[in-house]
Image (spheres, rainbow, N blue to C red):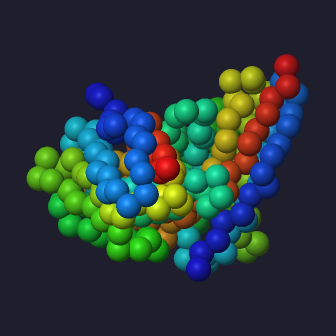
Amino acid sequence: GEDVEQSLFLSVREGDSSVINCTYTDSSSTYLYWYKQEPGAGLQLLTYIFSNMDMKQDQRLTVLLNKKDKHLSLRIADTQTGDSAIYFCANSGGYQKVTFGTGTKLQVIP
Amino acid sequence: KAGVTQTPRYLIKTRGQQVTLSCSPISGHRSVSWYQQTPGQGLQFLFEYFSETQRNKGNFPGRFSGRQFSNSRSEMNVSTLELGDSALYLCASTRTSGPGETQYFGPGTRLLVL
């Protein structure tokens, strides 16, 4: 079945850039998403990218997609302590059946 | 515009019981999806309803069921609860069931099965 893999943990210093990586297996993925989950909260959609794009930038967030390698990354520039959360990569071939990765816990050190 | 609401927020049940969780989508949203989140399995898709019809279904046993009402509110039911059903259950709503629609998540219902 479909699989989405992420590293479990990332630690960065405040002000540095964070890069969270994700690989997926479903070649029919049409939409790829990044979600943020803070403790005790639901998921917040940060950004998404269509599979025919290779980059999308939204303020401090940059998403890079390598469709050939099925690799997605999220770069957070000037990481702040408020960015500490779990980040989920997800993909969808369409409609609302979304497959989520295991999540990467980002720790920002002041 | 009010966000997605889920009730109850916390629930404790014992094995063998059944439970019903409720989700009210954002006003005007007609699609509701349900997910189970556990430390071991991560986030897994349960099912999606659109206009009172189940459109997609994940790989869960028949003990997990759902429905959607004409006002788009949705309920999910788990019968004969097992310890492994302890999880955070999240629902998400979108305006339609089309691809690329932004899913808005509720805060979740945390279920503990003893």
- Foreground of the two, A58 or B4: B4
Q: Position of residue A83 (x, y in %)?
A: 70, 30
Classify B44 as above or below B1. Answer: below
Is residue B38 visible in the rendered image? The answer is yes
Residue B49 location, quadrant = bottom left
- Foreground of the two, B111 or A51: B111
Residue ID at (66%, 45%) = A87
Q: How many numbered marks, from 0 up?
A: 0
Is residue B48 visible in the rendered image? The answer is no
Classify B85 as above or below B71. Answer: below
Residue ID at (26%, 68%) = B54
Residue B65 location, quadrant = bottom left
- Foreground of the two, A59 or B97: B97
Q: Quadrant of the N terminus of chain B?
A: top left
Classify B97 as above or below B23. Answer: below
Q: Residue furthest left?
A: B70
Residue ID at (80%, 29%) = A108
Residue B66 location, quadrant = bottom left
Q: Give the left or right position of residue A98, taking residue A63 as reference.
A: left
Q: Position of residue B107 (x, y in %)?
A: 44, 37
Q: Position of residue B70 (x, y in %)?
A: 11, 53
Q: Position of residue B10 (x, y in %)?
A: 42, 37
Classify A40 as above or below A74. Answer: above
Q: Give the left or right position of residue B40, taking residue B8 as reference.
A: right
